[in-house]
Image: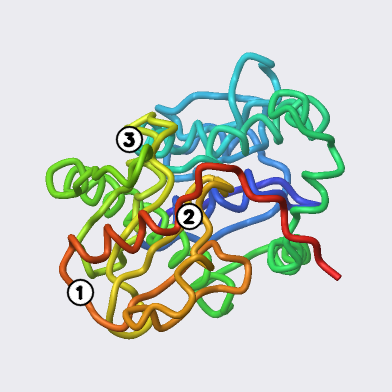
Amino acid sequence: MYKIVAHPGSAHKDDFLSVCVLLSALGHADVFRREATGEDLADPQTYVVDVGMEYDPQRHNFDHHQDPSLPCAFHLVMKHLGHHDTAMLMFEWYGHMSMMDVSGPHRTAEHLGIDTSVLFAASSPIDGYILARFSALTCLDRQDMLYELMKELGQNLIAMMEQKMERLARLKEEAGIVKVKHLKAIISTIADNPKLAMDRYLKFLNDDRVVMSITPSVRGAGWEMLRLGDNKMVDFRALAGSPDVRFIHANGFVAKTCSLIPQEAVIELAARAISEVVAEPTKNI
C-alpha cells in the first residue's frame, strides 16, 4: 500500500498539486499531513513531498527546502513522473508557480514586471476554499470527496498536457495563416474545443502581426472571430449590420457569424474589423 506524506498546517499549491499527480500516478494511496519520520524517508513505498528536508527521487523523497537551488516539490515530482518538460511547454503558469513557492510573490512580481498587488488581486476564492479544506485534514482516503477531486485533478492535468501537445501538432499541420489587410489571422477548421493549445500555437508562431483567430464557434453554428493580444486595431463592432454576423460583443473583441460561410467570406469580414488607426480605449461609465 502506497502512502503520501505532506507537511501539516497551511497547505499550498505546491504540496496540494504534488499529491494530486501522485494519486493519479499511483492509483491509490493513503495521504497523511504530518511531519515526515525517518521511517517515511527510508520507505520507497512512501512518497514524501514538500517536507522531510531530503530530495532523493529513488527513495521517493521530494523536499526542496534544504537546497535553495531546487525548484518546488511539485516540479520535483513532475520530473520524477516524466512530465516536467511537457508541462513547461504547455502551461504558462507552471514555471511561475515554482517561483512563487520558492522565491515568494515579491520576486515573482518583479520577474513578471508587475506590482505584487496584481498577483494577490488575481487569486481565486476557489483556490482558497480547496486549499483550506486540505489544510484542515490530517489524513485523506477514498472516503473523502476531496480525495476523488484531487485524484481527478491530477488525471486531468496529465491528460490536458497530452491533449495540448497533440493539438499543437495538429495546428501546425492544419491551421492557416491568412492576410487581413496589413495584418494576419489564424484560421482553423478544428471544431472540437477549437481554442485548445491556441496560446501555445501563437507562442510557436512568434509573430506580432497575428491579431485574431477564426475558428468554429462552440456556441451555435458559424465562425468565431476573436481578437488576440487585445490589439486595438481589431474592433468587430465595425461589422454591425452585416447580415452574416449574428453576435458582436459590446466591447468589440469577438464576433460570430450565422453559419460557416466560405473561408474567403469570413476573411473578408475579418478585414473589415481592422482599422489603420488604433481606436481610443472604451470608457466604462
**Mark 1 lies on residue:** 261
Q: Residue at x 60, y 48 (%)?
A: 5
What mark, if any, has residue 82 been given in the picture?
A: 3
Q: Reading the chain from its start, which is encountered first: label 2 or label 3? A: 3
Alpha carbon separation for disc pair 2 and 3? 35 Å
Q: CA distance from mark 3 to mark 1?
A: 44 Å
Residue 35's spot in the image, x, y percent? 73, 43
Q: Secondary structure at mark 1?
A: loop
Could you tell me how many numbered marks the image carries? 3
Give the camera-side residue of 89 and 62. Answer: 89
The residue wearing badge 2 is 227
Rendered position, 186 above or below 36: below
Residue 142 in sight here: yes
Q: Position of residue 135 (x, y in %)?
A: 76, 60
Using the rendered view, name the quadrant where residue 102 is placed: top right
Q: Amino acid at mark 3?
A: Gly
Sooner in the amino-acid sequence: mark 3 or mark 1: 3
Which residue is painted at 53% across and 58% down in the image? 235
Q: Does the CB distance between marks 2 and 3 fall below 8 Å?
A: no
Q: Residue type at mark 1?
A: Ile
Location of residue 51 with respect to 171 vertically, above or below: above
Disc number lying in front (2 or 3)? 2
Side of 194 where 70 appears, left or right: right
Q: Where does the image place residue 174, in percent across and percent down from the top left?
A: 13, 49
Q: Is residue 257 above or below residue 50?
A: below
Where, quadrant-wise, is the C terminus in this rendering? bottom right
Q: Which quadrant of the rendered structure holds the N terminus?
A: bottom left
Crowd tier of the residue under label 3, counting other residues whose Cα lies within 10 Å: few below 14, some 14–19, many 20 or above: few
Whether tag 3 and tag 1 are in contact, CB under 8 A, the answer is no
